[in-house]
Amino acid sequence: MTASAKLLSTSVALALALIIGSTFALTSGPGEPSGNQVVAGTAKAAETSAVKGTFKSAPDLDPPRMNVKMRSSKAINQKLFVGFKDRGAAIYSPNGQPIWFLPSRSINFRVQKFRGKPVLTWFQAATKGSGLKRNTYIIANRNYKVIKRVLPGNGLSPDSHEFKLTNRGTAFLTSYKSTTRNLSSVGMGTNAPVADSIAQEIDLRTGKVVWEWRSLDHVPIRDTFAEKLRRPGASFDYFHINSIEDAPDGNILISGRSTNAVYKVSRKTGRVMWTLGGKSSDFEMGKGAYFSSQHDANLQKGNKISIYDNGDSPVISKPVRGQSRGLVLKLNYRKMKATVLKSYLNPAKPLASQQGNMQNLKNGHYLLGWGGVPLISEHAAGGKMLFDAAFEDVGSFYRAYRSPWHGRPKTRVSVAANVTDNARTRIWVSWNGDSAVRRWKVMAGKGKNSLKKVANRTRKGFETTIGLSGRYRYVKIYGLSGSGKKIGTSRLIKSG
């Protein structure tokens, strides 16, 4: 079977899995209390699986393995951020080595700014060991300390699709609420359950709702392309909100997957100012401009919009496209016409029926997280692929991002050691969340009070293995910066 065939097969399997239990299923139940709180402590790992870790020094960590298949010198030299709903939140180096991992059920993991400083944000499900009573949006500082937990207001439950911080101390987030409507227009009865997609803007200081929008108040059910339920007994997901952002004029941009459309919404009234795509488009869609089951719509300078065009969905009968794509459209507001500026494709031809995103990088490149097919690629503005990577032991992820990040973990350096029968000592050392250490200084001895410097080794990847001649019963490690400054220390351990 070819690589393309394998990926397409994976996409089909994942679409079936999504019907049984999707990202949408990670939302909390309706009617839970709202509010937010400031908490102390580092982000807590949750119980996710029985998979054994791959690192001797950190056996509780098992980040998904990224296989970088191609990396051009022209690709941006920034870290990669990916949240996996079945494994956790992970930061990777530009060459695919893990830097930080939080075992959890985490989605939409990325770098944003809070109070003028870079922070990590993500949606985390309340699982055993997570310290959470309900699904929650998380903000953590560069020390990986959780500084805020955020929940929706008005009694709504948090949803994993969007958590976007603004520069005015607020955050956009999504929620779903089941209600009943006459669904006879779509063949599902006159008093049937339907999911209302809700966008909120929350004041991060007070937890109060400063803006709210509900799809059922503004977008008719007849505009849907959904043909079936996500799973038996589920509410009809006619709209499926999956991204929210500020428009340059102060209004709001919202993406609805099941309506194949993006909406500019009035902040003052909530009315739809224009619709791009779908059954009620205000724009004439030029050749190749039609998109379907899309994710992650973002307005850009020059009257452009980027969209991750899935081309397939778990709630439609057959794909609209043969492969997913990154899409950039030019919007002519005078003629109300949308034309294709560029389509970004992956040679593996992934068809992702769910998840995915398209990040516009500062130098004009685009990063594509292919979502339902676990691939990441970076493309030059003209389309040339500059970076190509695949995850080998997970089926999907929600979004992928590139960002600069300099974490400073407050935890100790992790170390393990054993003495072999042939009079040698093996040491394994790592430091979850750090990327500044360049060398490991090894202090070792036969007694606790007889330590001496025995090695100074270059750091290699997440975990460095160090072999020493001689039997050393006690070991302590110092992490050194490029200038030789001590920036991390392990505990004194006894070799196994």
Image (spheres, rainbow, N blue to C red):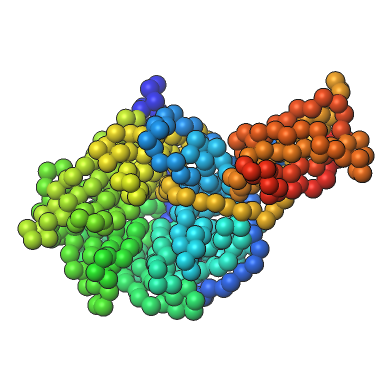
Query: Which quadrant holds the N terminus?
Result: top left
Left or right side of 467 for 212: left
Residue at the (31%, 70%) spot, across then down: 214
Left or right side of 362 for 477: right
Left or right side of 403 for 149: right
Q: Relative to 425, say whether 360 is above or below.
A: below
Can residue 59 be seen? Answer: no
Q: Relative to 140, say whether 54 is above or below.
A: above
Residue 453 horizontal/vertical position (percent): 81, 37
Query: Which quadrant holds the C terminus?
Result: top right
Instruction: Say which of 460 and 233 sits in front.
Output: 460
The residue lying furthest to the front in this view is 483
Instruction: Say which of 48 and 361 sits in front.
Output: 361
Residue at the (51%, 60%) spot, across then down: 119
Instruction: Say which of 169 and 278 sits in front.
Output: 169
Residue 288 horizontal/vertical position (percent): 16, 42
The residue lying furthest to the left in this view is 335
Query: Which of the 4 image quarters holds residue 196?
Result: bottom left
